[in-house]
Amino acid sequence: MNKKILYIILFVLLIWNAAIYAQQRFPKPDFESGYNYPEYQLTDPRNPAWEYIDVVVLIVVLALTTRFTLKTRSRKSILLISLFSLIYFGFFRVGCICSIGAIQNIALALFNDGYTLPLSVLLFFLIPILFTLAYGRQFCAGACPLGAIQELTGFYSVKLPRTAEVILSTVPYIYLALSILFAATNSHFIICKYDPFVGIFRLNGPATIMIFGILLLISGVFINRPYCRFLCPYGVILNWVSRFSNKHLTITPTTCINCRLCENSCPYNAIIPSDILQEKESMIKSRKKFILYLILLPAITLGGIFFTQMFSNDLAMVNQKVRLANELRMERENGIKAISIDAVTFKESGVTLDQLFAEEKVILTRTRKGAPWVGGFLGLSLGIALLLTTIKKRRDEYKPDQGSCYSCGRCFEYCPMHTEKY
């Protein structure tokens, strides 16, 4: 036998023996208290080149969706590109990279010097925003796998009462503000943790989250896109940007004839009706409401700041180190023994309580500074939303609300002016 081969075999056997010995010396701890190892939604390591392939695919999908919504005006083509995005970004790329979750990475990079933001994550965050600024919410129409899986299951359209829809529409603003706060304080990535569809894409995950995703899909059969409308934090940003879009989807390719056939075609209440018969009295009432809400705007904003500042310590408890420090402080001051896994692990780590309390103080300080911004943002958003309800413009045609329109193209087939050539 060749000596080189013999040496290689002996070397492999030596390494194998050392590995077995190491496993025997440091066996996996056996918890007798009924402890179950936590489930993590981990993906296999992948070649970094795939991240930039994803970026290219995203751009191509957005470009095709833009063509289908603005040029060919084909609802069928939009559905096909949505199906591709669901298969590629959803099941093939198992929900990563995600433009929605990138909000947290951006916040973490802005407020933490020790974190380097990957270029691909930055591009996934910015590219849909740039397309939205130019052409409306094309990302929602054809590129987002979360939107696609809901759009493809929305068979029936049941419109919610206007009051219920307005109340539920405030949730994404709260979700956005808290996700930025928790990411900036390095406390939690709540968007990723509570993503209702990533477990479905990966065919595994926490049972509660997967059940939540399935329930959303079932409800989405009747109340179309429930996650997009009442939870998605990235949708808040796209809603703002889309209002300033240079070229947006239109219901009719030519002049609107006010036939009203499209009036009930949109399941998202995103079609603004014509008001050519609007009375002057309603315009006067709207101006009075506008003045009232404008006066109340500072009070609403300050109220939001005061409210979140009051609960800043509770918000900080989301951070694992703050919870741990609180538990160990109770043990030292009141004799309540800390028995959690985190506490036991900390005691064996060699880190002192003073070091932990110092880290806790930093997190508490940052949360107390960030909480008022969260409250101010929510209060200001609410005040501006009230103001917008009072602004009445004369319209002689039916048109989509550029903020809330998902560019899904459902309204195309209801318009008698629509032809396949457009």
Image: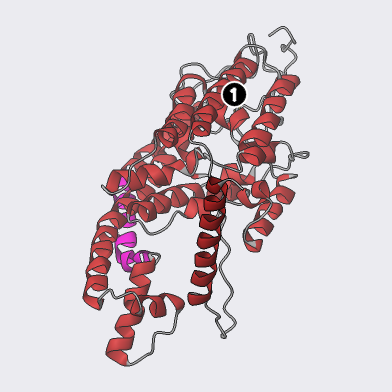
Q: Residue at x 62, y 11 (%)?
A: 71
The rendered magenta stretch, by its main secondary structure, is classed as helix
Image position of 281 (left or right of 293): right
Residue 299 is one of the magenta-drawn residues: yes
Seen in the picture, residue 201 relative to 58 is either above or below; the reply is below
- Tell me the kind of residue under disc 1: Val
Residue 202 in the image, given as x and y percentages of width and height: 65, 49
Span highlighted in magenta in the image: 295-316
Q: Quadrant of the C terminus?
A: top right
Residue 276 visible, this orientation: no
**Left or right of 373 in this view: 176:** right
For residue 394, side relative to residue 382 (left or right) = right
**Front position in the image: 274 or 192:** 192
Question: What residue would you read off at disc 1?
Answer: 61
Give the image location of residue 217, x and y in percent: 71, 48
Task: Name the element at disc 1.
Answer: helix
Residue in view at x 56 percent, y 85 percent = 33
Q: Is residue 253 above or below residue 336?
A: above
Crowd class of label 1 (few under 14; some 14 to 19; many from 20; radius 10 Å): many
User: Where does residue 240 sit, x and y in percent of width and height?
Assistant: 44, 33
